[in-house]
Amino acid sequence: MSGKVVVNRCMSLDGFIAGPGHSMDWGDDRALADFVAPDDLAEIAAATGAMLVGRRTWEVGERMEAEKPDSVDYPFSGPMFLLTHRPLVPPNPHVTILTGDIGDAVATALDAAGGKDLEILGADVAGQCLQRGLVDEILVYVLPVLLGEGIRFSSPGLARTALQPLSSTRSGDATILRFRVRKQSDQTV
Amino acid sequence: MSGKVVVNRCMSLDGFIAGPGHSMDWGDDRALADFVAPDDLAEIAAATGAMLVGRRTWEVGERMEAEKPDSVDYPFSGPMFLLTHRPLVPPNPHVTILTGDIGDAVATALDAAGGKDLEILGADVAGQCLQRGLVDEILVYVLPVLLGEGIRFSSPGLARTALQPLSSTRSGDATILRFRVRKQSDQTV
């Protein structure tokens, strides 16, 4: 019994997943956990069995933790996979580096999730997974801000992708939207 | 007793308010009204007393109506204002052309709304209104598609704008998000 592959991201209402320079300051120095209700984050983390993270998102996370050590905002402690061709210096014993094909990486990480969901973090990795039809769901934390500029949700070249809304939940000052990715095999409505 | 100034727009989940070339085909040739529950559109239209529309949005609407005459998708029949420096050829008796300052245009149209809401349509007009602090609320119809490319929600140069979530409602295959625009005078949380 396999879990779902879930692309997981924050977004400003105007469709940016980070500010200029990949800043994750969503206003008044607030990070995701300052917007979302802790119970909702805990519930999503509890459904997650593994994470597959892109290199840039990893580095943004490292930078955030260095700048604001108390900002650990996601109660997850399972297997963590990093998709990168550059080794981590120094190596990090808590993360498994994957370098191969994105399909193989997803299969490896999903297997490690032990029947729970695999969470995909990072615009490039998410884009590659979407292109390859590997994503089951997209979970978006819509944060209450217009950024005006920043890093776009879709990486260039992403093909049009039909979705099906699953749920919409107000959580603290955020809104959590969950969509299923429609597969090519779905009937056209 | 004055109504609210509400920026009103459709958006793909990845933050585009139209496809390339200002296409309003959101998938399988479906327009907004094919996604949203008719009762919800009727309720929003009933709260609207006037509309202020930008020139490009007006032309997109004209084009849609020419291509698909049955696609009249919004049960609104009140005063309509068009912000443009170019006269309509031929003139349209159902629309009042405004050419002046955006603040004056909003005041004129809001007055015509007779205590109901003024709906702002069009990325440029909406951006100008946001820049000038004229907007009370933003209403977004999130449509279940990733477009990958198109016309961005925010026009270039839009300053960071703090919002406050008001509601999130599933409506048909769309999700209607409503936000209050936080004014400079609001307390910082």
Image: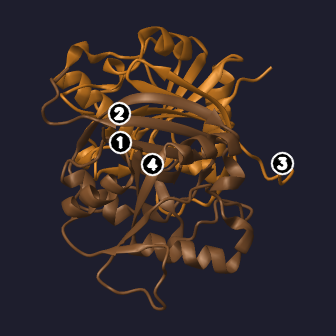
Chain colours: A orange, B brown
User: Residue B144 location, x and y as percent?
Assistant: 63, 46
Mark toward the start of the polypeptide (3 vs 2): 2
Look at the numbered disc 1 and give the secondary structure of its residue. Answer: loop
Q: Residues within 10 Å of mark 1 (few under 14, many from 20)?
A: some
Residue that mark 2 sits on? A144
Q: CA distance from mark 4 to mark 3?
A: 24 Å
On the rendered image, what quadrant is the N terminus of chain A found in? top right
Q: Position of residue B35 (x, y in %)?
A: 68, 49
Residue name at image x 48 percent, y 57 percent: B16
User: Closer to the camera, A170 or A55?
Assistant: A170
Q: Nearer the viewer, mark 4 or mark 1?
A: 1
Q: Chain of mark 3?
A: A
Could you say which is closer to the camera, residue A121 or residue A179? Answer: A179
Query: Is B6 drawn above or below residue B102 in the view shown?
Result: above
Cβ atoms at labels 3 and 2 below 8 Å apart:
no
Give whichever of A24, B16 is nearer the camera.
B16
| Residue type at tag 1 | Gly
Circle 4 residue: A153
- x 57%, y 56%: residue: B76
Of the two numbered discs 4 and 3 on the same chain, state the one appearing first in sequence.
Answer: 4
Residue position for label 1: B3
* Residue at numbered disc 3: A186
Asked if labels 3 and 2 share a chain, the reply is: yes
